[in-house]
Amino acid sequence: MDAMRILMDEHQSLAAIIHAIRHMIGEIDAGRLRPDHKLLEAMVHYLDAYPEKRHHPKEDAFLFGPLRARTHDADAALDRLEAEHAQADARIAVLEAAVKGYAQDPVGGFEAFKTAFNDYAAFYRNHMMTEEREVLPQIRKHFTAEDWARANAGFIADDPLGGTRASARAGEEDFAQIFSRLVAAAPAPIGLGAGPYKG
């Protein structure tokens, strides 16, 4: 089931970026790390460009819609998840404003960025848990072979981590390469510590 493999790979990469930012905030707060504002901004950009713009539309089109056609057992969870997907621009705008505010005012902007990020991270944790615990079991239970074939084809056709390793489509960001640069620049133990970030 390529769709499930790609979905879980994407969830893991998103969780890794969120964990990296959380770790960096903790280290900055403790005075053990100087902030790399370009790295933080690049990580926030990744959260916007990858999950909000690429990951969620695939879920809506190839998983959630077909599941609704098969059963009403997951309707409440799907209603909540789709509403959260629709609020993506507003949610990421708060985080982008906070990370830019922090870069412009490193002293006064830190607490606002930390709060905005913690809110975003808590939201995303709950969002992914709802998908994985409430919706994916229903998909596994109700999908037909045709549903799986469409979902697999849709996810394979737009696999920013795996599909772009060879070459990014024209005009699109290479998310595998971006992820590698973020990991390389992030401080140890969450990354390779090769910073500062050069985007």
Image: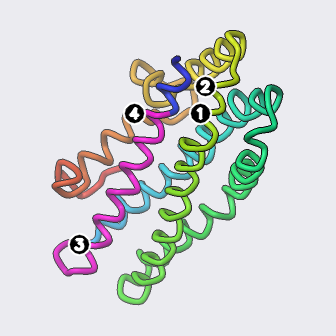
Which kind of residue does numbered mark 2 sit on? Arg
Name the foreground residue: 20 vs 70.
70
Q: How far apart are marks 2 and 3 (CA)?
A: 41 Å
Residue contact between numbered discs 2 and 1, judged by CB atoms under 8 Å: yes
Image location of residue 164, percent across then percent down:
46, 24
- Front-most of residues 18 and 81: 81
- When the figure is inspected, residue 11 is found, relative to residue 66, above or below; the finding is below
Q: Name the residue under label 4.
A: 176
Q: Name the residue under label 1.
A: 137
> At which x and y percent is residue 89?
68, 58
Give the Cα distance between marks 2 and 1.
5 Å
Q: Closer to the camera, 55 or 40?
A: 55
Query: What secondary structure is marked by label 4?
Result: helix
Q: What element carries label 3?
A: helix
Callout 4 amino acid: Ala
Q: Residues within 10 Å of mark 3 (few under 14, many from 20)?
A: some
Residue at position x 32%, y 48% in the image? 182
Q: Which of marks 2 and 3 is nearer the N terminus?
A: 3
18 part of magenta stretch: yes
Stretch in magenta: 8-33
For residue 65, above or below residue 195: above
* Among numbered discs 3 and 4, the one appearing first in the sequence: 3
Q: Which of marks 1 and 3 is in front?
A: 1
Instruction: Measure how far apart labels 1 and 3 are at the Cα level.
Output: 37 Å
Residue depth check, mark 3 versus mark 4: number of the one nearer the observer: 3
Q: Are marks 2 and 4 in contact (CB under 8 Å)?
A: no
Numbered disc in front, either 2 or 4: 2
Helix, strand or loop status at disc 2: helix
Q: Mark 3 points at which residue?
A: 27
Q: Which residue lies furthest to the bottom in this view?
A: 108
